Image: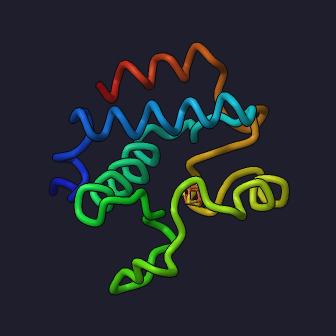
Amino acid sequence: MPNPWDKIVGTKEYNKNYERLIKFARQKGYVFNKKISRVKKVIGLMTMNYLEYGKYYCPCKQSEPPDLEKDVLCPCPTLDQEVKKDGHCFCELFFQKEKGVNKKAQETKRKEVK
Ligand code: SF4
């Protein structure tokens, strides 16, 4: 059965968000989860939030129904704390470098999602 985010993965909006987040990861010295399915899910759902609400709400931390005033945007303010404590953010998108993947694998993933 297809996932709700399958239709958004690889679109212009998805790629724009992907590039934004990978750039941020590089600046911070983080990497994405080595499980590409997880990356697609988190960035896909986040992109769907952007298309619906105009902001990059974190799909793992949003209220149900969404609280557009209080729900956090990605990257969230507690990201560094979470990575320090668990080795990854709450959504398991950003990982500490040594617990993620090497640069070559990261580039391969980029090609896969386009
Ligand atoms: S937990 Fe924070 S850093 Fe991770 S995807 Fe959600 S908002 Fe982004």
Left/right of residue 38 with respect to residue 24 in the rendered view: left
Residue at x 68% of width, y 43% of height: 95
In the foreground, 40 or 18:
18
Give residue 113's quadrant in the image. Answer: top left
Q: Quadrant of ligand 1?
A: bottom right
Vertical position of residue 85 compared to residue 8: above or below: below
Residue 15, horizontal then vertical, whole percent:
33, 32
Q: Report the label total.
A: 0
Q: Quadrant of the C terminus?
A: top left
In the foreground, 105 or 83:
83
Left/right of residue 42 with respect to residue 26 in the rendered view: left
Residue 40, horizontal then vertical, whole percent:
37, 44
- Extreme right residue here? 84
Give residue 72's quadrant in the image. Answer: bottom right
Vertical position of residue 73 compared to residue 22: above or below: below
- Extreme top residue here? 104
Left/right of residue 82 with respect to residue 13 in the rendered view: right
Residue at x 70% of width, y 36% of height: 30
Residue 1, horizontal then vertical, whole percent:
15, 57
Vertical position of residue 62 compared to residue 8: above or below: below
The color scheme shown is rainbow
Residue 75, horizontal then vertical, whole percent:
59, 53
Residue at x 77% of width, y 51% of height: 87
Residue at x 61% of width, y 36% of height: 24
Vertical position of residue 104 compared to residue 19: above or below: above
